[in-house]
Image (cartoon, rainbow, N blue to C red):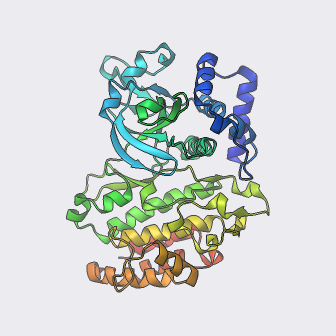
Amino acid sequence: MENNIELGGIQAKIQSQGSSFDSRRREVRRRRFQSSEYSTRKRSNNDHALEEESASQPLLLILRILSYHKIRLFSVNPNQRWNLRQALGDGSTFSVDGAELPIWDALAHLRYRNLDIKGPKEKFNFVDHTRISWQHTTLVAYKALVGRKSMDRGMIMQDLITELRVLCHRPLQKHPNFVRLLGVAWISEIDMGYTDDAEPREWPTVVVEKAPHGSLLDFLSSEEFKTTRSSLMAKLNLCIDVLIAIVALHACDILHGDIKCENALVFNTEKGTAENWRVKLSDFGHAILNMQGKGSSGFTRREVIGTDFYSPPELSSAEAVIDVANMKSVDVWCWGLLMWRVLIDGMEYSDAEGHQIDPGAMRALREQGNIAATAKDACKNYLNLHHSREGAALSSIVGILVDALSHNAADRPDALSLLSRLRRASSDR
């Protein structure tokens, strides 16, 4: 319902007062983005209604979303701020670079004169759309669309639209377990280091807060995590943070669709302890919004699939269709695999005998219905070896893992009940 209200509000605002973006700039960007590969794209059956505009004019819809939510726009001068860039990672839709927040560049353009400059001492601070103040020296992450020639630009623009809609969703904007959106920058393909044979275009690039410790997978393999000899409580808190975010998404009728350690980012809290970490969920390009609006037809594998390695058993078949009632269990399964990896300190997935589980072995275990049993044995052995003092709590923790990885989607508990059980298990230690 919230999503429909948002889209209705966007349309109403456009009809009543028009877009607040300069029409000439929008037209230039539209022409730069268009190419023969994109303009001839046919709509797939996976496109949802609104959907019509996002398929035919995705760039225009992006501008309308930014205008409706009053999202900040930044420019990036490749000769100044952009030379501080640091590659952070790559995904199927986005490549991620770190750099400083480009406030200085923004001040040089009249179209950014509405930045909330407070005074001499805070001369280069700005307040974002959620009224949070950021310094110009803030290190941020630039999530640029992957512009490879082989990819369907229409589809990756759909992913960007989904990403923005989730990050802009009001119940999630200030949630402590979601990465914060600061604004959007327009960056040329040349500045991002790749072009094709067409005229170089500017791409909308999402600007979010940069995680000091990188992804959860990076963090688990870092020297800081290893030398800290993290307690079981610390590891459970990492899992709890991700689960809290999933509960919030599901309450908004949103499926993340690609839960994994690589899509969870680790930040510092203000507790001042040796284990002051907080996980924030990110990467919402594969999310499905307004699941209940699908009706009784269900979702196909193509609509739901995120990363094949982490997909649940019900998505094993190419012809699979998932009932709306079982959709949220997809995130629960993926969270179970994330929990498995956190409990074993980020090591590669392996069975109780230490044999590594590669994609082929994972697929076989999934088809045989043996993932839960394998995870149970592997984690039980590891926890008894490294956290033997925790005693009875270990069986409760492993039990939660096993339930999350139930072979049948209908048998998996929902995220909220898992959260309650995991909190109880962590407090009973």
Question: Measuring 70% from the left and 38% from the top, which residue is drawn there?
Answer: 40
The quadrant of the picture occupied by the C terminus is bottom left
Question: Measuring 46% from the left and 21% from the top, which residue is drawn there?
Answer: 115
Give left or right: position of 422 versus 5. Answer: left
Front residue (pair 142, 244):
142
* Residue 423 visible at all: no
Question: Measuring 54% from the left and 70% from the top, which residue is drawn there?
Answer: 333
Give left or right: position of 60 versus 231. Answer: right
Q: Which quadrant of the view contains residue 13?
A: top right
Q: Is residue 256 above or below residue 117?
A: below
Q: Residue furthest top?
A: 110
Q: Is residue 120 above or below residue 290?
A: above
Return the x and y of residue 162 as percentages of the image width and height.
60, 45
Q: Residue furthest front?
A: 197
Return the x and y of residue 238 as percentages of the image width and height.
39, 62
Q: Residue furthest right?
A: 296
Front residue (pair 393, 72):
72
Q: Is residue 107 above or below residue 152?
A: above
Q: Is residue 147 above or below residue 421?
A: above
Return the x and y of residue 119 as percentages of the image width and height.
36, 17
For the image shown, how many numbered marks are present on the structure?
A: 0
Front residue (pair 418, 31):
31
